[in-house]
């Protein structure tokens, strides 16, 4: 697609969004607020992930369009409120990309991906220095994000000042410790204490993923997909009614068979 056609396509998308939000536009679109569409943004993000995981490129094209719609929606509402426009969003992004890629747009050098990341992080720190400073070191990790991502970033940020396990061995020990503490609380049937210990166990697992240089969200998504596939194999083999009527030992046997086939 030519530069002219790309510009025209994006301009049309912006114009359509403005038309939908206009006084004589779509009633549903006009009723939406920044808060009301947040959940749609999250859903669309995960649908993008799903299309990538499935290597479903036509679906990915469609899902990226839905994600772009979220950006246009927020920008249109911000424009209506006088906060900023979609042009401001693009201009801000362009300036940031150039500022953080001085090895491309200026005379800086960065021969490896790691060198690029180090430069990027250094520039981000310079940018943050000009903003109002948070009260506490961990305040820079947003609380309003998926808990698994927040846990990952909290551990990452704490590690930057040396507050971390020296190696992965300590995390395996911590995982065993938290598991034992959870079992102890389960025996008491104290739901508040059980929830607390379960949270500690999950937090430790997320930090284990960080030490292993894995994204816990993606690892869990793969585990979900694996469970789904193996359960489907069981269901196909014996039927859902048989599964419902099976004893725990029989279910375990069906599961072992499914694992052999998937």
Image (cartoon, helix red, strand yellow):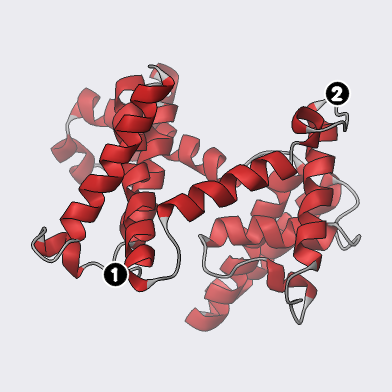
154 relative to 61, above or below: below
The image shows residue 9 at horizontal and vertical percentages of 30, 31
Residue 201 rendering spot, x and y as whole percentages? 64, 62
From this viewpoint, is residue 247 visible? Answer: no
Q: Report the front residue among 131 and 59.
A: 131
Q: Nearer the viewer, residue 138 or 135?
A: 135
> What crowding class fits label 1: few (fewer than 14 Cα within 10 Å), some (14-19), or many (20 or more)?
few
Residue 79, by quadrant, is bottom left
Q: Quadrant of the N terminus?
A: top left
Residue at left offset 70%, top offset 73%? 139
Image quadrant where residue 247 sits: top left
Few, some or many residues within 10 Å of mark 2 (<14, 14–19, 20+): few
Residue at 17% over, 37% down: 240
Left or right: residue 233 versus residue 75 is: left
Q: Nearer the viewer, residue 66 or 123?
A: 123
| Quarter of the image with the C terminus in it | top left
Give coordinates of residue 189: x percent, y percent: 49, 79
Q: Residue at x 48, y 35 (%)?
A: 222
Pointer 2 residue: 111
Disc 1, SS:
loop
- Which residue is tagged 1? 33
> Would you say residue 16 is visible in this rendering?
yes
Q: CA distance from mark 2 to mark 1?
A: 44 Å
Q: Is residue 111 left or right of residue 78?
A: right
Say which label, 2 or 1, has the lower sequence index.
1
In terms of depth relative to the viewer, which is nearer, 205 or 57?
A: 57
> What residue is drawn where x is 29% and y is 68%?
36
**Tag 2–tag 1 contact (CB < 8 Å):** no
């Amino acid at each position: 697609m030519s530069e002219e056609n790309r510009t025209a396509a994006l301009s049309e998308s912006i114009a359509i969004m403005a038309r939908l939000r206009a006084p004589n536009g779509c009633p549903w679109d006009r009723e939406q607020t920044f808060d009301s569409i947040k959940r749609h943004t999250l859903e669309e993000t995960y649908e993008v992930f799903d299309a990538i995981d499935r290597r479903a490129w036509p679906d990915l094209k469609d899902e990226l369009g839905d994600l772009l719609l979220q950006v246009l929606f927020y920008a249109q509402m911000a424009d209506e409120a006088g906060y900023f426009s979609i042009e401001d969003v693009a201009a801000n992004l362009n300036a940031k990309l150039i500022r953080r890629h001085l090895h491309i747009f200026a005379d800086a050098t960065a021969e490896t991906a790691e060198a690029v990341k180090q430069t990027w992080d250094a520039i981000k720190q310079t940018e943050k220095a000009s903003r109002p400073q948070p009260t506490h070191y961990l305040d820079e990790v947003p609380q309003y994000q998926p808990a698994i991502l927040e846990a990952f970033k909290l551990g990452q940020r704490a590690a930057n000042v040396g507050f971390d396990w020296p190696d992965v061995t300590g995390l395996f020990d911590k995982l065993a410790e938290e598991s034992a503490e959870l079992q102890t609380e389960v025996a008491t049937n104290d739901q508040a204490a059980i929830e607390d210990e379960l949270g500690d166990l999950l937090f430790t697992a997320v930090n284990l993923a960080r030490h292993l240089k894995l994204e816990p969200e993606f690892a869990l998504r793969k585990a979900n997909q694996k469970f789904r596939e193996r359960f489907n194999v069981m269901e196909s083999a014996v039927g859902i009614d048989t599964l419902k009527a099976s004893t725990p030992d029989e279910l375990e046997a069906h599961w072992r068979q499914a694992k052999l086939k998937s």
